[in-house]
Amino acid sequence: MTALIAILILGLIGLAFGALLGYASIKFKVEGDPLAQQIDELLPQTQCGQCGYPGCKPYAEAVANGEAINKCAPGGDETIKKIADLMGVEPIAMDESHEADNTPKVAFIIEEDCIGCTKCIQACPVDAIIGATKQMHTIITDECTGCDLCVAPCPVDCIEMRPIEKTTRNWQWDLESIPVTEVK
Amino acid sequence: MESVIERIERGQFWPFHGGINPPEMKFLTNEKPIRSLPLPEKLVIPVQQHIGEPGDLLVAVGDTVLKGQALTKASAPLMVPVHAPTSGKITNINLHVIAHPSGLSELCVTLVPDGEDRWRKRHITENFHELSKDTLIEKIADAGISGMGGAGFPTHVKVNTQAQINYLIINAAECEPYITADDLLVRENAGTILDGINILDKVLEPAFILIGIEDNKPLAIEALRRQTQDIDKIKVCVLPTKYPMGGEKQLIQALTGQEVASGVLPSALGIVMQNIATCFAIAEAVISDTPLIKRVITVSGQALSKPQNVWALLGTPVSFLLKQCGYPEQTKKHIIMGGPMMGFSLASDEIPVVKTTNCLLAPSEKEIPDDNIEVECIRCGQCADACPAQLLPQELQWSAKAQDYEQLNKLNLFDCIECGACAYVCPSHIPLVHYYRVAKAEIREQKLLDIKAEKAKQRFEARKARLERDKRIREEKHKKAAEARKARMNSGTKEANKEKSAVAAALARVQAKKQQKAPDDDNQPNDNDKSPVAAAIARAKAKKAAKQNTTSKQKPIADDDKSTRVAAAVAKAKAKKAQASAHTKDDTPDSYTDNTQKADSVDTTEQSPKSTQAENDKKARVAAAVAKAKAKKAQASTPTQDDEPDSNSKDNTQETASVDTTEQSSTSSQAENDKKARIAAAVAKAKAKKAQASAPTQDDEPDSNSKDNTQKSESVDTAEQSSTSSQAENDKKARIAAAVAKAKAKAKAKKAQASAPTQDDEPDSTSKDNTQETESVDTTEQTSVSVETDNDKKARIAAAVAKAKAKKQQKNSKAN
């Protein structure tokens, strides 16, 4: 009798917890791959495709599934380090096939050369180019991620990548420039 | 609240943590009155002199402006206008190095004074108490006033608060050593300052107004007390001298005992703080309609022979002020803008003074030595004792050096007011504030990048969604159109029957083609030999194009390059062949499967031999040259591919049309041959030129490609059929067909000639051409096929329909 009660109680407890877990798994279901999402947040979102994937999110998903973490050229070593921290792996050097230079750049259209072919507009992953057929195009500098994708399709080579200009707004203090001195 | 006032009345204040007492150097300048200076040779007025956005320019180079005239206007809340400090001419609007630690350039208006100092029309306000709050704020905004203590926050934004204000604090602490500008301003203009305070009182309606002033300015305190003795609301609070008493948070704590928490604005505590120089500017702006065009600047330092406070027009170059105050001519210049604790060294002495400049310091070598070498931190902890923000400077320093921004945020780096007290007390001469500034800038930059990345992500996703949606809509449209067509065809009306028969005709044509291959063996050995080759080439090309399309995103150049080079080689070979065997039967099918340009060029070569044997050689050579040039060009323009089917397909149709014309005409009648062929050749040449012009726009889209191919193959049919029909030459129908073709060729030749120079921009007309072409093809084909095979029922029906159409078109062409 005691054994039966014990089994019954344990069985009931088991059922209750099972129901609870089942409910929780439905109620708190995580949509998508949380790891891929976290990696995606670390990527610079230039959508440049230099990693070989069509955008940052696909690369994040690939990394979550075991792709090498050193393929994000615009992110550079910092991004590699961050992803390595997140994934708990050793940071590795940047993939050799990628350019080491990751100074932030934006595209610039030499407007007098533009023939209005709209090819760059179709290439831009973030719709940062405005223009129409046979009308001059121009770049919305604030939206440009510097991904380089518009340069190749241009039939008249009127797009070039220019480093972002230093202004008082994005200027960084240089430790060497002004020594702090004390008043005696 | 009463207790705060009681305490203040008893002369007691709250202490704030840390702080230092650097040596007072105010004696250099506080004995002398504020000096007025002559007009400088030129004024350089930066368009932006405050925190926020620069205003929109109102003037252009060459304009003559009056004193006080606005140079920019504000179109957004955080914009502040700037005004002409004197009358004169605008000589330049360009980038000029500005008062910023970076020494970077920003947009500046250069004004050369005319010496007359003529004012614009001013409206003196007799009694500002009659004005409404909004009018007062508007006047403050129009006068271009921004905080004059150092930060430069737009004053009209700061005073336009909805919060209930308990204390309006007037900051006259002036805690930096050396600076005496506010001290002298109060002493000389206490009355005007009181007006300014009263205006702020009217705008903000605070319960109390506290004027915080350090006890090292006895004359200024006396002047303020004298002015405010009858006003209960205003309390002059004399505070002990301690750096940084003038910090906003420190002064609030000292006066009210309230600590402003991290990330909280003082207005949330019912407190607004204004600098006393700002009060003066407000009074000037409201009462005498004088915008902010000049300010008191302490020009001090032991390198100067005549250190003094001066009234400087905004935009005066630093070099002019230094010269006026006796700065010795020396090569190595070290000038600090702002106080010695928080100021920054200037990159050039051509930098103009701005609204926030309260001090120019020209120290002697002895005063501020720059040979202090940073050594290791000895963990003495003096910095933490000195920090008025109660941070841990030493910890911050470690994290800043390690670029551990997360930890820096945890240590509340952004509460650092960069007062420099920690660096001042550091026995190891560590430039702590510098490390913080670098780290702050990095973190800010990172935040901006994060925001940008987020935006880019959103835009990317939005674009992807849009493309998918468009694709879906297109597919749906196509599906609907197909269904509608089906429904129409099954409806049983006359038009439906017509369409049905067109389809039937097409089917029959395909069949006819198949059957034709066997009996045509002896007729066209050339063709038959070549057609499988051509087909193979076409297939290979289609494959390559497909491949290109999939890989073009990654490597459009390499692939394309190769394919066009191959194409170019083929074209060259063909041109040569054409030249060599000028009078042999054409290798049209081959060329048609090829690129448009090549087809075109080969046509030229084809046409010319047919027309006249004499001209043959020359023309062929010309054509070959053209073909070669084209091949080269195609090679050169490899990286340039077109995704737009419009122009190309148009060109293509034109070309094929012309080819039809010429061929048909040449085969139909030998008599007319010469003339027509020559015309055709001319047309072809014109087209070749056009194609050459549009050479950089090559096609890579599969749609247009396939379209091209079909068009081309159709034209090939025409050629074949016409020749077969003329060779058969016994059937009546065939003759009719030939006649029809002739008529059409004429019409088309005309049309082509007309449209060639104007480059036919109407898609309608070309499509019309197209349909006509295909129909004519049907006609000729069907007629011949019916003669040769004559057993298929469908084919016969189709032939009948084709006959009807041929008649109709004959009519049409006559009408044309």
Image: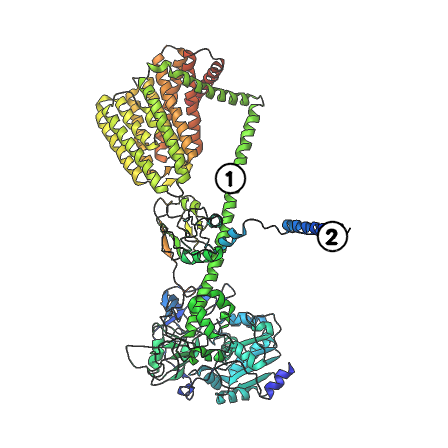
Report whether residue B132 is seen: no
How far from the left and from the top, in percent, is residue A108? 38, 53
Q: What residue did someone put label 1 on? A: B471
- B303 vs B721, nearest the viewer: B303
**In which quadrant of the rendered image does the C terminus of chain B lie?**
top left
Q: To which chain does the residue with label 1 belong?
A: B
How far from the left and from the top, in percent, is residue B522? 32, 14
The residue drawn where x is 48% and y is 58% is B450
Q: Residues within 10 Å of mark 1 (few under 14, many from 20)?
A: few
Q: Nearer the viewer, mark 1 or mark 2?
A: 2
Left or right? Give the position of B168 relative to B380.
Answer: right
- Residue A179 sits in quarter: bottom left
For label 1, the SS is helix
- B750 vs B697, nearest the viewer: B697
Left or right? Give the position of A158 relative to A28.
Answer: left
User: In the rendered structure, which amino acid carries the disc numbered 1?
Assistant: Lys
- Residue B426 sits in quarter: bottom left
How far from the left and from the top, in percent, is residue B157? 54, 69
**In which quadrant of the rendered image does the N terminus of chain B lie?**
bottom right
The residue drawn where x is 38% and y is 22% is B717
Q: What residue did someone put label 2 on? A: A6
- B21 vs B70, nearest the viewer: B21
Q: To which chain does the residue with label 2 belong?
A: A
Q: Residues within 10 Å of mark 2 (few under 14, many from 20)?
A: few
Report whether residue B152 is seen: yes
For label 2, the SS is helix
Q: Do labels 1 and 2 touch, CB within 8 Å?
A: no
